[in-house]
Amino acid sequence: MKFTKKYEQYLQGEREKGLPLVGLKKLKKILKACRREIEARQRLFEHVEIGESSASIANKESNKCDNHCDGTCAVCDGTFFPSLLEEMSAVVGCFNERAKKLLEMHLASGFKKYLLLVFGKSSSSHSFLIQEGKDLVTYAIINSIAMRKILKKYDKLHHSTQGQAFKAKAQNLHIEILQSPWLCELMAFYINLRKNKVDNKATLELFGDCSLTFDNDKPTLSCCLFESMRVDIDLTCAICLETVFDAVSLNCGHIFCYMCCCKAASVTIINGLEVASLDKKCPLCRRVGVYPGAVHLEELNILLSESCPEEWEKRRQFERQERIRQAKEHWDFQCRAFVGI
């Protein structure tokens, strides 16, 4: 079955929930109208009048390829990219909000959990949490596939690279859903739930396609859906080259150890990443302003601590000593500043 049919089947259920989606049909209609315009223009150029000068013919041929050479299209660029940008922004915003609420529910305890249950009007059962997590991961991946396919179709029609350029723009605007830290958190979340006792065994089968593997001590979080999209998240910190500890995800989507991020951003653990300068760059992609707003990956930290407990405990002891040292230096400095030394 083609992806478009799968996507239309998926839309039938999601429209009832009121979730924003990528309007694949609408975008295809825009491209179809553009194709008709291009074909009509090509037929016009092919019917060159008899006796027309070679200079005029050359001028028409030059105009004929303008649409392909500069990668722009006056017919659909004014509606295609703005529509896709608006839809992807809505999809990512909805996904991040729902995933955050779901994970807050799972990690909450005591009175906070009671308040979330009462005012959130949701269930805290394992079956409900697992199904909701699965639905959100499916929602993220299928909309990401839809965006990639429609951009590929645009580039094929216009013989351009504008679609690829738009993908880069989406990453800079943080609306590339596969870069969302909440996707990584959801994958770790339902692996954690799978390890616990779940009453409904059929529910466990939903998550047979998600796993944490250690290949030559290289940890990877993987998820495969729809047979055409596989998400592999490398959990090796690019700064210390170890498995991420106390993992955080920067705004660009790259994952590092919290202490390594603090060093890269030239801030102390006491002050945190929120005070990092906006000109500090990600060690991998070199984007600026990615430290404020970084997300602590609590579910991923739980998963890694249970998957490699010995290594986790060694890192915990080391970082505890480092945090104590930095805290002591911080307060010594504050005391000296207070007394004027």
Image (spheres, grey):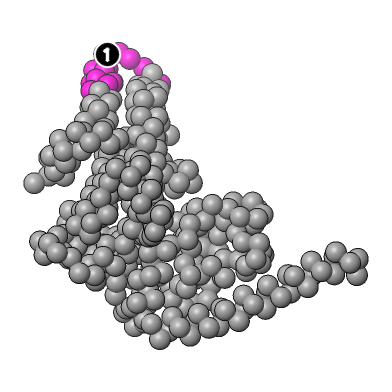
* Residue at x 22%, y 59% (from the top left corner): 126
State the residue lying farthest toward the right.
340
Q: In this view, does 297 lie to the left or right of 289?
A: left
Mark 1 surroundings within 10 Å by alpha-carbon count, few (fewer than 14), some (14 through 19), many (20 or more): few
Q: In this view, does 94 lie above or below 82?
A: below
Q: Which of 160 and 203 is in front in this view?
A: 203
From what the image shows, is residue 142 above or below residue 16? below
Is the residue 65 above or below the residue 170 in the image?
above
The answer, for residue 38, to whether it is visible in the render is no
Residue 116 is situated, as x and y percent measured from the top left of the image, at 36, 48
Q: Image check: 108 left or right of 289?
A: left
Is residue 37 covered in magenta? yes
What residue is drawn where x is 36% and y is 51%?
A: 114
Q: Where is residue 306 in the image (x, y as percent from the top left)?
A: 34, 77
Closest to the observer, 22 or 14? 14
Relative to 49, 175 lies left or right: right
Q: Position of residue 139 (x, y in %)?
A: 26, 46
- Tell me which corner region of the image, top left, top right, bottom left or bottom right, holds residue 10: top left
For the C terminus, the image quarter is: bottom right
Dividing the picture into quarters, in which one does residue 161 lie?
A: top left
**Which residue is disc 1 drawn over?**
49
Residue drawn at 19 percent across, 33 percent down? 16
The magenta span reads 36-55
Q: Is residue 200 magenta?
A: no
- Magenta region's main secondary structure? helix
Q: How many labels does the image show?
A: 1
Q: Nearer the viewer, residue 211 or 166?
A: 211
Residue at the (68%, 72%) spot, across then down: 327
Tell me the amino acid under the disc marked 1: Glu
